[in-house]
Structure formats: structure tokens, C-alpha cells
Image (tube, helix red, strand yellow):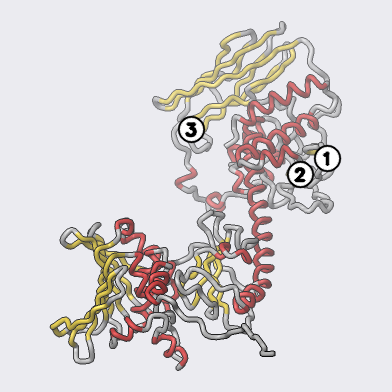
Amino acid sequence: MPHNDDSESGKLKLGDHWNAITIIALSQNNPLKAIAEFVENSIDAGAKNVTIVRGKHKSEHYLKIVDDGHGIKDFRYVATHIGDSIKRELKRKGEQGLQGEFGIGLLSFWTVGETCTLTSADEQGVGRSMKLVKGNPSYAIRDAGTLIGRTGTELLISPILAGVRVLSGDKIQNFLASELRDRIAKSGVRIRILDHSSRRELIVEPRKFKGRLIHQLPEPRCPFGDVYLELYFVDPSQDSSVGLYKQGTRVLSDLVKLDAFDRAPWNSRQIEGIVDASFLQLTPGTRDGVIMDEAFDSMRVALEPVEEALLLLLEEQRKAEEDEASRHILNRVTRAFREAFLRLPSEEYGWLAARTRESRRPLPETGAQTTGAPGSPDSGLTQSEDGLTPADANAGNEQGLGDAAFGEYLPEPLDQQDGQKSFFDFPGPLHKLIISPASSVLGVSERKKLKAIARDRAGRTVDSDVLLEWRILEGGGSLEGVDSVYAEYLAPSEPCVVSIELRATQNDELRVANALITVTAELIQRSGGAGGASRRGLPGYTYRKAPGELWRSRYDEEQSIIFINNAHADFVYASRHAMTKLRYITRLFTKELVLANFPEASKEEILERMVELSLYTEENLK
């Protein structure tokens, strides 16, 4: 019996050549990418100057690209060898630096305009041109009939499609600066844009990254070729991305568009730069995609050590930023409490009464960086950046806080060391007036010293040319030193509430401050007074992660550290906004200060004190 074999083999063929060409021409969906391909053809032709012209002639918008490269020697070859570029043959012969290889870039003019006219001079300098029409399979080559006194090519697309007219010179400039970044830099080509519509001339400069260059990254080793990296740390932004390039030309604006790289660190938005792999196979039509072949997978594997190094660097940077933010928060909290203590009675809030120089014990391992511990360089009271001035230190001393409260820990200002005073250290006009303390409780027939603190807009103490006047607005008692910085109040023999007014005048400026004194026949006696030797000033704080535990903060008196539970739901919620986080930490400080200052107080009194301290502290948060 005869053997029936239905198998058949052969070669694939195009059923309709023009249909295939149409598909190729329409595969480029980005007119800016098409313009970049035209410019790249000029660079491949050895051009050193490329001019892009946007204009309008006889009511028709046009785009023209002129270069001084080698020109086109055989128009017919270009028109009849679509998909078989002469550049591919040149690459086989070893010529370097050529980007195109598919012979289809010229067809992308379909996404820009209706007709494309190429003009170039032959070896005798006679101009020849070729005209292509969108949607038309024919081409026409003719002599220009004139001598062209220069080499190079002119590409004219007219009329431009309606949707492409919105592509301004600025948009073209920005796109080419990123798309052809390394090609421009390496070739030295000068790209100029003449935008007649806006009457501007623009120069395309290779894009410069603004971040901090990342050094000492592992070298990617790939058997298919070299992988070049240029990466920068930047401030977090949705616009920050790492682009994928091939031989200096951008393929993808964001590496994260590839599923294989849609992970940290590439999607952190804290890194920008380029990854350039010369061996990648691009999608021919759009040239904004990559073939996921062995070469691509090899690049992915080669970048894994780089990813690990970047993740470590990002973690180090995150910790450094957290430490800096914590120092900044502590400085702001310290300033706010310092202002609050100026207004509150020192006998009630003696937290700062005995700040000592004793060294701090080492902290237990908590996994967090300590911020602002007493005597440490990070303490908000030991840094010059905390805003303390010698005048502020004196204000603390006059309140009965002692030299160790502020001044002992303040470095001597440079201008004082040199025996000179900077211009900006001289106080300005009177702006603010404070009575310290602004609220106090006093026994009958007792005395209380009050201090006037005048400041300029920058917070500097104004201590000259200021006329002061103290007086009792309401209540009994008497005042001594009614025209000096320090006034002394003598309480009457009967309980009352006293309102004291201070008026300060400098030239035509008048400021008024008020203080309240509650005169009582019976004062609350406190055990373990705040002025004891164990009090060591405003503490520092650090984080301790305790997920699932309900405590928000704890004060370690031995180390003078407030531990804040940064795994508590309230901390996580407050951390969404900087000011909310600052207020939350301030309230935790308030809680611990009150508990430490009033160990024998009732629940009601503790709550009252918290309201009082919060009022005067949060007013000064900035």
C-alpha cells in the first residue's frame, strides 16, 4: 500500500508586501521617538551639526531636520531595502557607534506628517531628492537641478499631523536630551532647535542628573557584553527613575516598566540614572521595548549584586535621614519646652534645676539610634543649632535653674572668641515681650521675682533702649522695681488672683505682656521635689520597637532617656505628617515630664498639669 505523508515544509513569505510595510510604518506610536530616530540617522552619518526647524509655510506646518553628515548616496537602495539596512552590513564589517540596523526608521514619518522629502547631494555636489507619501507605496526620486555647496541631508515632513503640532521646541529639546544623552556626549554633535512658532532657538544638551553620584558599586559581569551604570541618589519623587539605554540611546524611560525590575531598589523613586546594555535586542517597530531573550536574562542576573548594594545604601541613607529628623525634632521640642518653662513657675517645674555633667550609661540594644541623650553630641541642649543663645541661658539662670541648666553646655560663640560681634548678632527692633514666669502659685505674704524678656523678630534678646513699666492690673499686693528688668511681687495676706501687666516701649514700638499669680493660703506639699539631684534636665529620646504592646513611651531616669514605641498604632498614624509626628512626640515628652515632676500627684492633678504644660509648649512649636 502507498504511504500517505501529509507533512510539508517550506519558508515563510509575505502574502502582501505593502500590508507588511504599512504595519511596520504604523508600529511607531510616539512622534518624539520618530524625531529621535531621524536625529540618530544624522549622527550615524557622521554629522557634527543637526538643526531641527519647526515652522509654517503657506498655512502648512512643517518639521525640517538638516545635518552636515555624509549624506545619502543611493536613494533607490533606501526605498527598496526596507528591513535590510546598509548599517547592518557595516556592523558586520566592524564599524562601531551605529545604532540603526532594521532599515525601517524612515517609515516612522507616518506618525509625524503626510509627506517626507529627503534631499542630499551626490559626489559631484548635485542635489537629489526622494519623496515619500503616507499610505502610498510609490516613491519618486528626482534631481534638484541645482548644486548644493555642502554635504549632508535635509529631511522635510509636511504637513504635520494635527496632533503633532502641540510638540513645542521645549518638548523636543527635553526628550532628545534624555533619549540621546550619551550619544550626544560621545559623538560631540551639536543639536539646535529653531522654533519659528515661538520665535526661539534652543540647544539640546545631554541631560544632567542632579543627585549624588553613587560610587563603588559592584561591576556587572555579563557574557554578552558590557553593562554601564551611572546612578544617583535623589530626593524621593515620582519623577525619579532609572532609564534603560542601548549604546547611549534610551530604550525605556523607567526600568520598572519591565516586570523583572519592578521591585526595590529600582522602584524606590530615590535613585535615578541609566543602565546601558549594548547587547540588548530591541523591538524593531517601536524601539521602546526589549526582547526577553538570553541576553536580557543575563543582564538581569548581572545586576543582582548591584541591587543588593543599592538596598544596603538605601537602608543606610534611611537611617541617617531618620537620625537627622530625630535631631531636628528634638531641637524643636527643646525650644518649645524652653519657652514654656519661661512662662511656668520654676517651683512647680523643676526639671531643669540640676543638670549635671555625669556621664550617661550605655543604652541597651534597641535597634534604634539614640537622639539627644544628655551630654551627647546629639542633645538638643548641647548643639549650637538648637537655637540657644547666651541671653536664653541667662533667662534660665534667672529663673533659678542654675548655671548647669543651659550656659554650662553652650559652646562659646565664635564671634565672642574673636572679641568681635557679627552684624547679625545685634538685636533688631522690639517685637515680642514675655514675663517669666507667666503663671505661678504663691503663698500669702510671700515674694516672687518676675523677669521681663524682650526679643526681636529673630528671637534675640533686646536689652537696650527699652523702657519698662510694671503694674498690677487686678488683685492685691505690691510691686518693687516697676521700671527694671526684674520686678518683685509681694503677695497680700489674703488669697486672691493677681493680674500683672508689663509694658515695653522702644521708640514708637509698644508691646504688652501679662502674668497671673494665684495667691493661696495653702500650698500643695510635694515629696521628692523636682529640684533633687536626680533631675538631669530635658532628656533625649530613642525608639524601641514593641509591636503589640500598648505603652507609647517610657522614661528611664537613670539614663535620662525617653523610649518611644515606634510600633504603636498612634506613632504609625502620627508619622504620616511631619507636624503631627512633632506634636505627638511633644505630648509624650509632656506626659513623662509631668509624671517625673509630680510623682505624688493625684490623677486629676496630673491631667491638669498635662493640660497646662501642653498649652504653653505647643504654642511654641515651629
Cα gap from disc 3 to disc 2, whole angstroms: 51 Å
Mark 3 = which residue? 464
Proximity of marks 3 and 1: CB atoms separated by less than 8 Å: no
Q: Secondary structure at mark 3?
A: loop
Q: Nearer the viewer, mark 3 or mark 1?
A: 1
Q: Amino acid at mark 2?
A: Ala
Placement of 323 over or under 563, stated as above or below: below
Proximity of marks 1 and 2: CB atoms separated by less than 8 Å: yes
Placement of 501 over or under 564, stated as above or below: above
Pick whichever of labels 3 and 2 is earlier in the sequence: 3
Any part of residue 212 in sight: no
x 30%, y 65%: residue: 113
Cα gap from disc 3 to disc 1, whole angstroms: 55 Å
Pick whichever of labels 1 and 2 is earlier in the sequence: 1
Placement of 387 over or under 129, stated as above or below: above
Q: Amino acid at mark 1?
A: Glu
Q: Secondary structure at mark 1?
A: loop
Mark 1 = which residue? 549
